[in-house]
Amino acid sequence: MSLARFLDLADFSREEVLDLLALADRLQQHPEPKALAGRILGLVFLNPSLRTLASFQAGMARLGGNSFVITPGQGTWALETRLGVAMDGGAAEHIREGLPVLASYCDALGIRAFAEGKNLDADVSDAGFKAMATLIDKPLINLESAINHPCQALADWKTLDDLAVAPRSKFVLQWVPHPRALPLAVPAAALHMAALRGHDVVVARPEGYALPAAVMDKARAAAALSGGSVTETDDRATALAGAQVLYAKEWGSTTHYGDADGDARLRADLGHWQVTGRTFEDAAASCHLMHCLPVRRNVAVAEEVLDGPRSVVLHEAHNRLVVQMAVLHRLLA
Amino acid sequence: MSLARFLDLADFSREEVLDLLALADRLQQHPEPKALAGRILGLVFLNPSLRTLASFQAGMARLGGNSFVITPGQGTWALETRLGVAMDGGAAEHIREGLPVLASYCDALGIRAFAEGKNLDADVSDAGFKAMATLIDKPLINLESAINHPCQALADWKTLDDLAVAPRSKFVLQWVPHPRALPLAVPAAALHMAALRGHDVVVARPEGYALPAAVMDKARAAAALSGGSVTETDDRATALAGAQVLYAKEWGSTTHYGDADGDARLRADLGHWQVTGRTFEDAAASCHLMHCLPVRRNVAVAEEVLDGPRSVVLHEAHNRLVVQMAVLHRLLA
Amino acid sequence: MSLARFLDLADFSREEVLDLLALADRLQQHPEPKALAGRILGLVFLNPSLRTLASFQAGMARLGGNSFVITPGQGTWALETRLGVAMDGGAAEHIREGLPVLASYCDALGIRAFAEGKNLDADVSDAGFKAMATLIDKPLINLESAINHPCQALADWKTLDDLAVAPRSKFVLQWVPHPRALPLAVPAAALHMAALRGHDVVVARPEGYALPAAVMDKARAAAALSGGSVTETDDRATALAGAQVLYAKEWGSTTHYGDADGDARLRADLGHWQVTGRTFEDAAASCHLMHCLPVRRNVAVAEEVLDGPRSVVLHEAHNRLVVQMAVLHRLLA
């Protein structure tokens, strides 16, 4: 298998994902420091990053390649994405020029473009990222779009493999508090990944925070292929009974999408959804805490859990590097 | 020919420019991935960049070298440029220390320093950049100064070659609208380049936007060497009749230089200078639209033109990488 | 000697420092462009940088390695450092996650974290940096902490060697004016370095700007080992009589630490502590001006001195690259 693009784990069969994870393992054990000699990765960050920014640069360097980073609006022109508008405002450049130009300087391009957070349908359909993708005629990597984060999903899958978490075990994706509404990309990607890996996935979230039907349906389709299952509930205690994995994640209200005040009113009473030691009372003794990071301590997850033995968040974050090297190898070697 | 500095296309004979373009062609066809092994390019951006930032890093990497980027004021101290002042304000470091220090860490240095836009004579004489250049005892590249952008000019020349645009054909440099006054660097560099390539160049611009006499004279001197010509007019229709190239560019009023309000009053009535499909009515059937980018869609140039077959703006932008690799090769190989 | 960490010059014996300087000399004369092939340095800047940012990237590249740069708050989440707080403010990530994750992507990590400037004891004990250091299980480099700047100290030592300044000569560390209170890191590091090199060190500073007792004691301990001495005075003229080195440096009041208004009242009358040509009247004829940069011209040091023959500030700054390559070689080769 060679890759042309890495945009969505759902673009690949279960076997293709396992192949990619096997390559990640192989590169971890047998480094190939010259595999990408002379190759250049362009990284465009329309939003902040720490893991993605560092791990893609490190990954290219470990494979002998090189990279450049563009953060529009920081030492670079802000980019307009809409068509048909008179560009008389703050954005000096349009993605229809900016992105093809950057693609023409490199061998593969990665783009991070978070959800706008205004229109749920537009974000769930990933309209913005898909419009960008049509402009690029090079291997392209989704560094997190409005509704997807395939690099995180692949790293999480590898983490579950590394920890020998059984595929048919109970995987709980639990909503956790945050000062404001965050995008749906990671919960959607983690849910689909866990379903495709074959878990019995339970989405535990308060009223008003149900994941969109399209996101749930996509995960159910993956579960149907793998023998897993996908359910949802607002009853945390029941959800966590017997869980092998608690995947904590913040996201915004879907009933009040794009309505910051409405969302804030809802979440004002939801501080008790914070993950603490007690959250694990009825979970499996070996239940792991996963989180994609960054995580707000004592808001989303209590310090006692993050600093305790259940947390595998650093393992997950390190696996970003490991799996992305496999993606880069497939795209560019 | 080996280069010590790449500051102005006018520093080279027509034959030397052709040599450099031949090297660019050669490197495009026969890559030299180890030519600059161990060499380091320092890039100092006192102003925003996208193409220059990405293409110089990519170019060094493609030739086996490496680079570092400094953007004063962003993670780095703001730099003072004036002499004799007590530095008790926002700038923590002076260019007299900062630039020589950075030069001492690399094998060649590139500097971007836009026009201040206050004093026309100071900007036209490139006083600021020249003062910086005296501080550097390494190969130096002008990444765009107050009145010059030689990398853009060389990329544009190559684009004309690639498209087989005849040297004696009509090349129109046309002023286009923008929300505010922009520097004279690109129009001055494009004008000189087209004249040195041998075109019959017409500068089409509204009243109040005539290019400075020194800029026009320099282009006329180049035309005298190459057999081209340089004229100017405020009559767009006549200018474009039979044109093979429309080079669109925004710049600020020279009669109201440094007077933002006066310039804004002038340009308020000049929206019709936008390039649209109709602009090409009397141009040659094959007339190309050139622009250095970034371009404001539907303000400077209509979407229909940028997305249509006349536009070669992406080709120009890609050639930035191609010609700069030749410049780097000459400076450092 | 191989290094596990480079956090404080005081962690090494005088002989180990001399070894490191000998390696710097050797690499300067006999480059090793492949010594760190495949190695990756992560650089985390919680504060601005110019020399450190550029020279570490250049140094890794000259040794065949690579690096990535993270500047939290600029294209990256701001980082929380306190334990036990509910992270409901501006910082999206805690150092307890962020730093170990970054360390897991590279072979060595450098961290810059300036003094908070609120609590003198906390800053003098370097509590913040030490807390970060406990989170990192990779080779670690102090890129300037609250109370230390070992890379600067090592570069300064090499500069004194290069200039053949005799170890037992008089070295004056003199306070100079600045618009606001600056950290104690460089004066503390320079004082200790000069004492360990064997100088007769005089700290010349106004009332209210005495260096903390712990800083003075550490330097005196170093002097005891090397045969040097450490004294202090508020009498500049006496201090400078016969001096071979004037090391100028800005720092904040220690009697009004964290009290910006109180410090500002003190320094309002101290403009005459600026180093000018007259400052050297009773110094040795060959007395050098040293400064770590950035320096505010005509506030801290007069232009006539910075641009004159006494100034060795550019030499010092270049030596940052030279000695850091030795540090990187020891940590990673």
Image (cartoon, coloured by chain):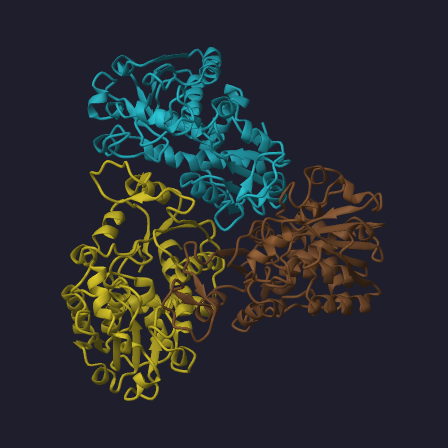
Chain colours: A yellow, B cyan, C brown
Q: How many marks?
A: 0
Instruction: Say whether residue C1 is visible.
Output: no
Query: From the viewer's perspective, is C72 left or right of A227?
Result: right
Looking at the rendered image, the quarter that the N terminus of chain C falls into is bottom right
Q: Can residue A35 be seen from the camera position used here?
A: yes
Q: Position of residue B268 (x, y in %)?
A: 27, 26
Vertical placement of C18 versus B182: above or below? below
- Which sits in the foreground, A332 or B101? B101
Q: Quadrant of residue A78?
A: top left
**Where residue C10 sits in the image (x, y, percent)?**
70, 67
Residue at the spot 53% in from the left edge and 20% down from the top edge: B13
In the rendering, at what x and y percent does residue C333 appear? 62, 62
- A320 vs A118, left or right, is right
Place residue C274 in its image quadrant. top right
| Residue at horizontal 48 percent and vertical 35 percent from the top | B324
| Location of residue C82 in the rendering, given as x and y in whole percent from the top left corner | 47, 71
Answer with left or right where residue B225 lies relative to residue A191.
right
Q: Nearer the viewer, residue B79 or B65?
A: B79
At 41% across and 54% down in the image, what residue appears? C75
Give the residue drawn at x 43%, y 79%.
A307
Residue A221 figure quarter: bottom left
C125 shown above or below B297: below
Q: Nearer the viewer, residue C271 or B272?
A: C271
Q: Nearer the viewer, residue A275 or B193?
A: A275
